[in-house]
Amino acid sequence: MNITLGAKFEKRINEKVASGLYTSASEVIRDGLRLLFEKDLVKHQQLEVLRQEVSRGVGQLTAGEASSKNVLDIFTEVEQSING
């Protein structure tokens, strides 16, 4: 695989290697990709919880029930459930 990153990214990668935190540019890239994949997973989990909450809310409204939660309360609960 051949990837062109550009001077800005190459400089940052070389700084990471020079700092001693990483032994190679490949290691820096792998770590960055790991973080990207973790971020994608968290986003997917957040969306799934939100979908479940919306579905539950629609069901409650249909049944004539109401909730005192607002959207910010739900987002806070989602973050807490994912972050532990």
Image (tube, rainbow, N blue to C red):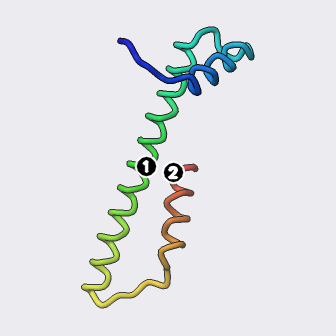
**Residue under circle 2?**
82
The kind of residue tagged 1 is Lys
Please identify the residue farthest to the front as the structure is shown.
Answer: 7
Q: Nearer the viewer, residue 1 or 83?
A: 1
Rendered image quadrant of residue 46: bottom left
Q: Nearer the viewer, residue 50 or 34?
A: 34
Residue at the spot x=56%, y=13% of the render?
A: 25
The kind of residue tagged 2 is Ile
> Where is residue 62 drawn, in percent x and y?
25, 85
> Which secondary structure, mark 2?
helix
Indicate whether 65 appears above or below 3: below
Q: Is residue 58 left or right of residue 82?
A: left
Indicate whether 26 appears above or below 67: above
Residue at the spot x=42%, y=41% of the render?
A: 41
Residue at the spot x=63%, y=21% of the render?
A: 11
Separation of residues labelled 1 and 2 (CA atoms): 10 Å
Which is closer to the viewer, label 1 or label 2?
A: 1
Q: Residues within 10 Å of mark 1 (few under 14, many from 20)?
A: few
> Where is residue 28 drawn, in percent x and y?
57, 19
Please identify the residue farthest to the right as the structure is shown.
Answer: 19
Q: Nearer the viewer, residue 66 or 35?
A: 35
Q: Which mark is residue 43?
A: 1
Please identify the residue farthest to the left as the structure is shown.
Answer: 62
Q: Nearer the viewer, residue 3 or 49?
A: 3
Asked whether the beta carbons under mark 1 and mark 2 sit within 8 Å of each other, the answer is: no
> Which secondary structure, mark 1?
helix
Rendered image quadrant of residue 9: top right
Please identify the residue farthest to the top as the structure is shown.
Answer: 23
